[in-house]
Image (cartoon, grey):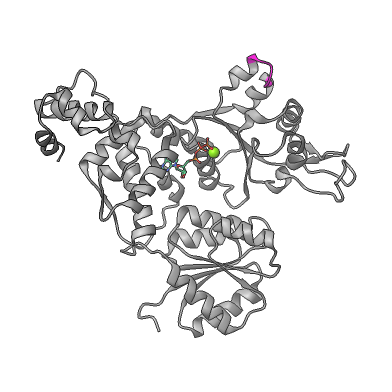
Amino acid sequence: MPLEQENILIVDDDVQILELIQRLLQSLNYHTYKAISVKEAIAILQDQSIDLLITDLQMPGVDGLQLVKYVSEHFPEIPKLAVTGFPSIDGALKAMKSGVMDYLIKPFTKEELKNAVQKSLALSQKPVQKTKRKSQGNTVYSEIIGQSESMQNVLNVIDRVKDNKATVFIKGESGTGKELVARAIHYMGRFSAAPFVAVNCGAIPESLLEAELFGYTKGAFTGANDNRSGFFQAANNGTLFLDEIGNASMATQLSLLRVLQEKEIMRVGSQKTEKIDVRVIAATNVDLRELIKNGRFREDLYYRLSVVQIEVPPLRDRKSDIPLLVDKFLFKYGVEYKDRIIKISDEALLALERYDWPGNIRELENSIQRAVIMCDKQVEIGNLPKHLKFQIDFPKQDTFLSLKEVERLHILKVLEATKNNKSKAAEILQIDRKTLRDKIK
Ligand SMILES: Nc1ncnc2c1ncn2[C@@H]1O[C@H](COP(=O)(O)OP(=O)(O)OP(=O)(O)O)[C@@H](O)[C@H]1O
Ligand SMILES: [Mg+2]
């Protein structure tokens, strides 16, 4: 029996099941919280320190999969156990991908529940020190790290649009956090209990995009054996995030324009319109103005989409955020892989700050993830990818370096140029190899 009772949050729209699971868990000496909707669940998660989430997958409105995804993003340390009545390979795969660790198929016995709960709790990767989360309603904000002025501007705009339904257009290089910003707008706002549906327009074949977005009627095309809803219907009352909007065909663009103007959609194969209430957030990492010039993007749609524009700055333009981001990822992956908080040496941090990050935050995150796996207790320069170990950019002219620092940078530069060949480097520097070795140390 655990010394400290573990807190388990149970989410199911079926009150009878909810109470049944609660009774069983209480008899096993767990402390339980109940929620009959995702909205309630999120409120509890923000307020309480939860050790395990048990959720139904099929629920009206925002479903369990979206809750699992939310928890994976915002409370990655909480293990997730899914309860489902209709196991399907497709559903199981989706659930696993969103972070579900185990499955419980209805109906189940007390013994099966006990085993699944114990297994999930054992797999949990709780932070070393369990801290009580305070109710502050800003968990998504706390996900977005950015003290730099440019990121503070982004946070300001998020704050201004989160409670209305204005269309938002997010620009930014790959990996800068466009999707995170879109999610923050949704989950921070008044409509957070409604669905957030993300569609990558670049990943769906052009010929299918329209049917996927607006749904279709039976017989609309070969293979359309049923009436089906699209992403717009799925996102009704909530947010539809259209990622890589530059990939939408001209026909789809025209339909989108109509939705934004008329707030109604037409399924493929139907002449009937359906009213729809969806906030659209579109994102792109390509220059739409270029596409407009080349006749590949409608200018009128561009203006409709960009009622509010957010430009997420590349990481190289906000290097002051690097230490905080590094901390966040060290924490995340330290807990995940090493069960402890991992540190970083000054030298390694300096190398991270000097690098230009063409892949932005995603590249930084991947580098730290890898470094944490490779290091012992602390990330050293040797744990970082080669190409950034020796990237030296001299600080801007207005900062003066000490002789020692200039020497250090010069040695690193020569090592980079010689691909780390110490004999060659020593020759260029006109010092012997031992001196060079000492200096490198
Ligand atoms: N400001 C931030 N603070 C913390 N983490 C961030 C921040 N911005 C982005 N991330 C993390 O970096 C990763 C990439 O972010 P995201 O997927 O939102 O980028 P993107 O701009 O949509 O990229 P792409 O154009 O490639 O789709 C995610 O894991 C995200 O959580
Ligand atoms: Mg993205």
State the predominant SS element of the stretch in magenta: loop
Residue at (35%, 53%) from the top-left corner?
A: 373
Residue 116 in the figure: left or right of residue 122: right
Residue at (11%, 38%) from the top-left corner?
A: 438
Residue 260, image quadrant: top right
Image quadrant where one finds the C terminus: top left
Residue 210, image quadrant: top right
Residue 394, image quadrant: top left
Image quadrant where one finds the N terminus: bottom left
Q: Is residue 108 magenta?
A: no
Residue at (53%, 36%) from the top-left corner?
A: 161
Residue 106, percent across and down? 66, 75
Residue 211 in the figure: left or right of residue 441: right
Residue 143, percent across and down? 42, 47
Residue at (50%, 59%) from the top-left corner?
A: 43
Asked if 137 appears above or below 122 in the picture, the reply is: above
Residue 348, percent across and down? 25, 41
Given residues 47 and 24, the one toward you in this image is 24
Q: How many marks?
A: 0
Please say whether residue 392 is visible from this viewpoint. Answer: no
Q: Is residue 294 magenta?
A: yes
Q: Residue furthest right?
A: 219
Residue 268, percent across and down? 83, 38
Q: Give the residues drawn in magenta, as a range.
A: 293-298
Given residues 299 and 102, the one toward you in this image is 102
